[in-house]
Image (tube, helix red, strand yellow):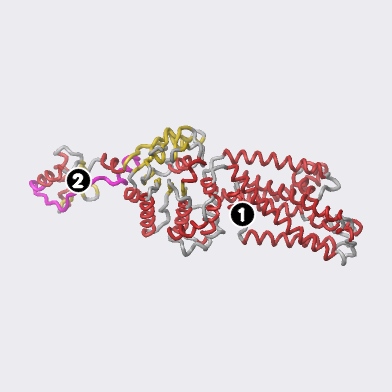
């Protein structure tokens, strides 16, 4: 059996002259949480739809759970998915909506109530879907995705509409599933969330994959930054000059001097500032966050 | 396929749809059959489009199912609406993607949905038959219609024949609704266009040129329910109706199979 839960090569989708996804190539290992990020319109949802057999590919190949994406019937029974938000029948209750999907997939009805409880809808299962808040709808969508007890879970913006407590619950749920061996492929605009939970990352820009691999590796590739604040605001320009004279690229951002350098320069920078009669109120060596990296890489 | 059908039946049995539809079936079946007997002496007629159906015709073995046969095309319109709504709503609610993730074979989805909706249509027809025939039996003595032949072997055979014809007609109308649902992907568009065509456009076309009736889908499907009409032979109606349904179903199924699901 392949060690990759998802493996696609040159996956392409054109809508007439418009290229939605262009030669996307990436792998997602089994048992990992993989973040799928990119600006709006970068082709994330189209890629997910191709992986789930909802949209025909224009070109390229792919395998999900070791099966070709040209035969979705072979792998979809082991895949759970929530695409572009939860979609259910408004006149049916949450529980009945899950029963419909359970009947369709040939899953036991006995799975429905425990899943509702797992996502925090145990006591609202009999309420009609149309009466649910956005957060509750999102939770029901996650419960539906978990119906097949999936080996691969594909979640498109699972935290949309959730409050901070709900976001934390979903984060924990995803972590628990990954601990149990489920591969989770999750797209989200909340990059801080993705950074917290994802070991792997696939980044798209204008339909092209600009990075795939370990999140830590991506962040390690980024230039670390030393952020220094002076006690007196008037000393900032002097600090900037000191950094530049030492051969580093630097700029003033939000009342602090940002010097592109690793932490080894921090002690020397502190000494140079002291010698120039500048008292520093703070000095930190930081790595860019995923959000900062994302903006830099996507040019957003 | 049966998983799809069972899943679809769960949607069809929701009270607002099931009880609402069956309520309408009971009301209109009772009404159509009652008027046949209550207006028997009315100079405006007691049948479709003011036709006079006298005591001697109602006393024939087919008399007991006259009302049931005439309600057939109305049941067909109900079936068209239900089939169209059940199909098109998957697009408007965005639930089609859930269905296709759980059952990737698009043909199984279509066939399973159709199987479930056929069961729904058959329940509708059984209910209409019970109400309609019961109303006829109850009202015949009051209208001084002799019912002896209704319970003869020929009468029982007429019941069975009409029942089969109405089912064929209703399912034919339903499939037309399903085709419209797949083509328009919106319940409102599919239903309004279907009903507008059947109730207004076809009647206008027939009024302008009577011969066109022979080639119109609604007229032929209605004629099947009645076992043929004076202007439309049963066999002809069956062939033309089937041709419309088969060609339409093939086109819609082909589109459904090939189309990307991007909503």
The image quarter containing residue A263 is: top left
**B73 left or right of A45 in image:** right
Q: Which residues are magenta?
A: A273-300
Q: Which residue is mark 1?
A: B9
Is label 1 in a helix, a strand or a loop?
Answer: helix
Q: Which residue is mark 2?
A: A226
Rendered residue at 22%/50% (across/down)? A255
Q: Residue furthest front?
A: A1
Rendered residue at 32%/50% (across/down)? A196
Labels 1, 2: front one: 1
Q: Label 1: how many residues lie within 10 Å, few (<14), some (14-19) or many (20+)?
A: many
Q: Position of residue A195 (x, y in %)?
A: 32, 48
Q: Position of residue B26 (x, y in %)?
A: 73, 61
Q: Residue furthest right?
A: B56
Which chain does tag 2 point to?
A: A
- Nearest to the observer: residue A233 or residue A300: A300
Number of callouts = 2
- Nearest to the observer: residue A57 or residue A181: A181
Q: Is residue A177 magenta?
A: no
**B46 left or right of A45 in image:** right
Q: Is residue A278 magenta?
A: yes
Q: Position of residue B139 (x, y in %)?
A: 84, 65
Q: Position of residue A172 (x, y in %)?
A: 36, 55
Q: Residue furthest bottom?
A: B142
Are discs 1 and 2 located on one and the same chain? no
The image quarter containing residue A222 is: top left
């Amino acid at each position: 059996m392949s060690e990759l839960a998802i493996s696609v090569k040159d996956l392409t989708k054109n809508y007439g002259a418009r290229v939605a996804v262009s030669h996307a190539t990436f792998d997602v290992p089994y048992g990992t949480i993989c973040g799928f990020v990119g600006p709006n319109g970068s082709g994330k949802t189209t890629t997910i739809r191709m992986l789930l057999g909802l949209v025909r590919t224009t070109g390229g190949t792919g395998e999900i759970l070791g099966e070709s994406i040209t035969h979705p019937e072979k792998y979809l029974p082991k895949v759970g998915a929530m695409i572009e938000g939860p979609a259910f029948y408004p006149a049916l209750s949450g529980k009945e909506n899950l029963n419909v999907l359970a009947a369709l997939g040939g899953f036991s009805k006995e799975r429905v109530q425990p899943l509702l409880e797992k996502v925090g809808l145990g006591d609202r299962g009999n309420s009609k879907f149309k009466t649910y808040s956005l957060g509750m709808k999102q939770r029901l969508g996650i419960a539906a995705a978990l119906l097949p007890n999936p080996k691969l879970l594909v979640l498109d913006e699972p935290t949309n509409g959730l409050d901070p407590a709900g976001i934390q619950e979903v984060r924990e749920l995803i972590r628990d599933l990954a601990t149990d061996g489920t591969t989770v492929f999750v797209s989200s605009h909340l990059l801080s969330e993705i950074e917290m939970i994802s070991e792997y990352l696939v980044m798209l820009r204008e339909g092209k994959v600009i990075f795939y691999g370990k999140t830590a590796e991506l962040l390690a590739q980024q230039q670390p930054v030393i952020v220094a604040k002076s006690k007196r605001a008037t000393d900032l320009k002097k600090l900037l000059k000191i950094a530049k004279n030492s051969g580093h690229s630097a700029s003033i951002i939000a009342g602090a001097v940002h010097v592109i350098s690793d932490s080894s320069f921090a002690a020397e920078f502190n000494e140079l500032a002291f010698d120039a009669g500048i008292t520093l109120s703070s000095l930190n060596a930081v790595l860019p966050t995923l959000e900062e990296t994302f903006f830099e890489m996507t040019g957003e | 396929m049966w998983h799809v059908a069972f899943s679809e039946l769960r949607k069809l049995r929701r009270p607002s749809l099931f009880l609402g539809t069956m309520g309408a079936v009971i009301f209109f079946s009772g009404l159509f059959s009652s008027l046949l007997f209550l207006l028997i002496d009315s100079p405006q007629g007691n049948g479709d489009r003011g036709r006079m159906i006298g005591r001697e015709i109602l006393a024939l073995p087919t008399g007991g199912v006259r009302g049931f046969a005439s309600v057939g095309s109305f049941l067909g319109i109900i079936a068209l609406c239900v089939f169209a709504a059940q199909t098109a709503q998957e697009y408007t609610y965005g639930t089609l993607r859930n269905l296709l993730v759980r059952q990737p074979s698009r043909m199984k989805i279509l066939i399973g949905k159709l199987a479930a909706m056929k069961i729904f249509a058959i329940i509708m027809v059984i209910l209409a038959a019970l109400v309609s025939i019961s109303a006829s039996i109850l009202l015949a003595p009051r209208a001084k219609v002799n019912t002896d032949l209704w319970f003869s072997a020929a009468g029982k055979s007429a019941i069975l024949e009409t029942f089969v014809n109405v089912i064929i007609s209703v399912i034919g109308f339903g499939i037309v609704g399903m085709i419209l649902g797949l083509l328009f992907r919106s319940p409102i568009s599919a239903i309004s266009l279907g009903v507008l065509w059947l109730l207004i456009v076809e009647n206008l076309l027939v009024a302008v040129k009577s011969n066109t009736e022979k080639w119109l889908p609604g007229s032929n499907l209605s004629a099947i329910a009645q076992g043929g009409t004076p202007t439309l032979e049963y066999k002809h109606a069956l062939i033309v109706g089937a041709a419309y349904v088969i060609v339409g179903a093939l086109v819609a199924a082909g589109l459904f199979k090939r189309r990307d699901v991007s909503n």
